[in-house]
Image (spheres, rainbow, N blue to C red):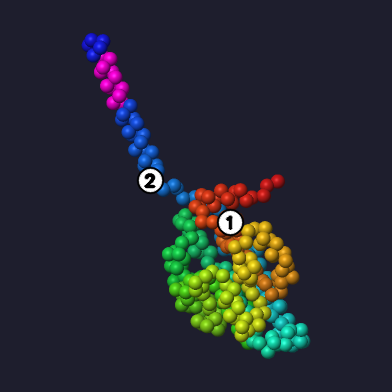
Amino acid sequence: MRPKNYLLSAGLLLSTVLSVYFAGSSVAQQQQATQPAPAASLEYQVAAILYQQKAAEYRALAYQAFNLARWQLDADLDKKNEKKLPKDQRKMPRAIVVDVDETVLDNSPAQAYGVKNNIPFNQKDWYAWGEMRKAKAIPGAVEFLNYAVSKGVKVFYVTNRDEVQKQATIDNLKSVGFNDVGPDNVMLRQTESTKEPRRKAIEAKHRIVLLMGDNLDDFSDAFERKDIAARFAETDRVRDLWGKKFIVLPNAMYGTWENAIYNYGRLTEQQKAEWRAAALELP
C-alpha cells in the first residue's frame, strides 16, 4: 500500500474507533442518568425494632408508664384532692387521652416488614397493615385503661391515623381487649395533623386527668414542628408535668424526634442517612 493511502486508511480506522467509543460512552452516561439511584438501606432501624420486640427492658418501661398512670389516676380519684381543683372543673367528668400507635398498639411488625424489604414508610403498606387488625397491645395498656373505664373515666383514643382507617382501628382495639371503644372516642385525623383541636373538643366537656403518648406532639402543640433545641427547651420548661399529667411511652423506631433531625424536610433516604450521621455528637 502506498504511504498516502496507508495514512488515509489509518485515519479512517482511528476515526471509526473514536466514534464508536464516544457513542458508547454517551449511551452509558444516558443510562446512568435515567436509572434511579439505589435506595439507601433502612438497616439503621433494626436495633430500634428489636428493642421493642425483644427487650424485656422495653416491656418494663411500658409497665412502668402504665403503673405510674394508675398511681396518678388513683390520686386524682381521691376526694380530698377535689377541693384543690378550680370550681368549674370539680363536677366535670374525668378523661384520659391516649395516642394509639406505639402507645396502646404495637406496630413493630409493620416496621420490620419495611426494613426486611427495604421499603420506606408509605400509605399503601400502612393501610394494608391496619386492615389486618393484627397489632398487639402495648404491655400494661389494656389493664390500665380498662381499670380507668371501671372507675367511670372516659378514655379518648386520639390518633393521626387517617379517617379511612377508623373501623379497622376500632376493631383492632377491641380485639386486644380494650373496653368502651367506639366511633365517639376513637378520634382520627381529619384535615390536619395537629391534635390540639381534638384535645380542645374533649376539654370542653371533660377534665383531662392524663395524656399518654410516644411523641411530644401527643401532649401539646407547643412541641409541633420545633427544631431539636426548641423541643429540648419546651420539654425542660414543663418538667413538672412529666410523670404527673404527661406520661411518655418509649418509641425509638420513628417519630417527630427523627423529623426534627431532618428539619422536617422532604429528603431522600440517602439524604436522611447523611443528616443522621451529621447529627451525631462525637468526643
Does the magenta run of residues contain 12? yes
Prevailing SS of the magenta stretch: helix
As drawn, 13 above or below 218: above
The amino acid on which the numbered mark 1 sits, given as a three-letter code, is Asn
As drawn, 203 above or below 237: below
The crowd level at tag 2 (other Cα within 10 Å; few <14, some 14-19, many 20+) is few
- Residue denoted by label 2: 34
Q: Position of residue 54 (x, y in %)?
A: 58, 62
- Give the secondary structure at mark 1: loop
- Residue denoted by label 1: 263
As drawn, 87 above or below 97: below
Residues at discs 1 and 2 in contact (Cβ within 8 Å): no
Range of residues picked out in magenta: 6-17
The amino acid on which the numbered mark 2 sits, given as a three-letter code, is Thr
The residue located at (60%, 58%) in the rendering is: 260
As drawn, 146 above or below 233: below
The residue located at (36%, 38%) in the rendering is: 28
Q: Position of residue 201 (x, y in %)?
A: 58, 80
Q: Earlier in the sequence, mark 1 or mark 2?
A: 2
In the rendered view of the protein, which quadrant contains the N terminus? top left
The residue located at (53%, 78%) in the rendering is: 186
The residue nearer to you, when weighing 27 against 53, is 27
Q: Is residue 281 left or right of residue 101?
A: right
Whether residue 273 appears in this view of the structure is yes
